[in-house]
Amino acid sequence: MKHRFLVLIGLCVFFSWPVYSWGPTGHKLVALIARSQLDDKVVENVNYFLKGMSWEDAACWMDQVKNEPKYDYMKTWHYVNFPKDKTYVVTKEFNVITRLEYCLRMLEYKTYQTEDVLHETLKLLFHLIADLHQPLHCAYEEDRSGNDIKIYMIAKETNLHKLWDSDIIENKRMDMWHCAKALVGLKLSAKKRADIEKINVMVWMNETRALLPSVYATNGNKVDLRYIDESATLIEIQLMKAGLRLAAVLNKYFK
């Protein structure tokens, strides 16, 4: 475990990320965190099915193609919304939960799948695990995941969803070092880490959704520095958890 943490610290030194939205930055970070926690053989096996695609590109693929009409069917796969006063009801509709569970089924029976199917499954898996850990991807129908809530951040007009997707990350210039410090700050025991790495999509979603009261605690439409700092810490922790959980899935099916 100590060796894997040192690998993560090493990545902080060698990778310097430009500032993007939660999309490319967040997804690349989750992929790299996951890779840093895996043995070389697992990485080699995953690389075989990625067919020359980098982990970072695989993680961003779903966002890169979402403006292409032939991929319109994937638009609802990035999130799950339901009313504030309700709990999630199992459905056959395509959302981030049902698509992640589909990916896990494909991996469970991967010996029966073609290499092309497994290639696409990995791209979906990399992306959707990260999406599930963004609280406003598990949010409320009433305000369209915070898109209808106007927010002012340091004299800049935005909305709550964009605030979490990109504005806070840009303000804090988040990178691998921020995420590594967040992991250290959690002071995880072996048991707590094992609990985080348990593979259960519904548990992950409920845990993420439970963060929404903090997300919505903006004290009006003008967020202050305290809100930004506290939210940044939550984002860093969520990225770390997503990376550890992606690693756990890959370790289970590609070891």
Image: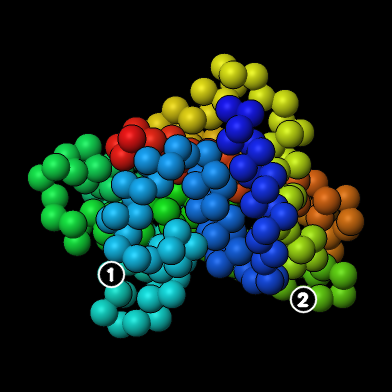
* Residue 147 image point, x, y percent: 60, 67
- Of residues 169 and 81, the one nearer the viewer is 169
Which disc, if any, is residue 187? none
Asked if one can make out residue 145 in the rendered structure from this viewpoint, the answer is no
Dot 2 or dot 1: first in sequence order is 1
Q: Quadrant of residue 101?
A: top left
Residue at image location 73% in from the left, 40% down from the top = 182
Disc 2 to disc 1, how far (Cα)? Answer: 31 Å
Name the residue located 57 percent from the left edge and 17 percent from the top edge. Answer: 191
Is the N terminus in the top left, top right, bottom left or bottom right quadrant?
Answer: top right
Q: Is residue 130 left or right of residue 13?
A: left
Location of residue 79 by image quarter? bottom left
Q: Residues within 10 Å of mark 1 (few under 14, many from 20)?
A: few
Task: Name the one closer to the observer, 73 or 32.
Answer: 32
Kind of residue at disc 2 = Glu
Residue 11's place in the image compared with 249, above or below, is below
Foreground: 106 or 91?
106
| Residue 157: numbered disc | 2
Q: What amino acid is found at the position of numbered circle 1 in the picture? A: Tyr
Q: Which residue in the structure is indicated by mark 1?
A: 73
User: Which residue is depicted at the point 58% across and 55% down?
Assistant: 29
Residue 122 horizontal side relative to residue 11, left or right: left
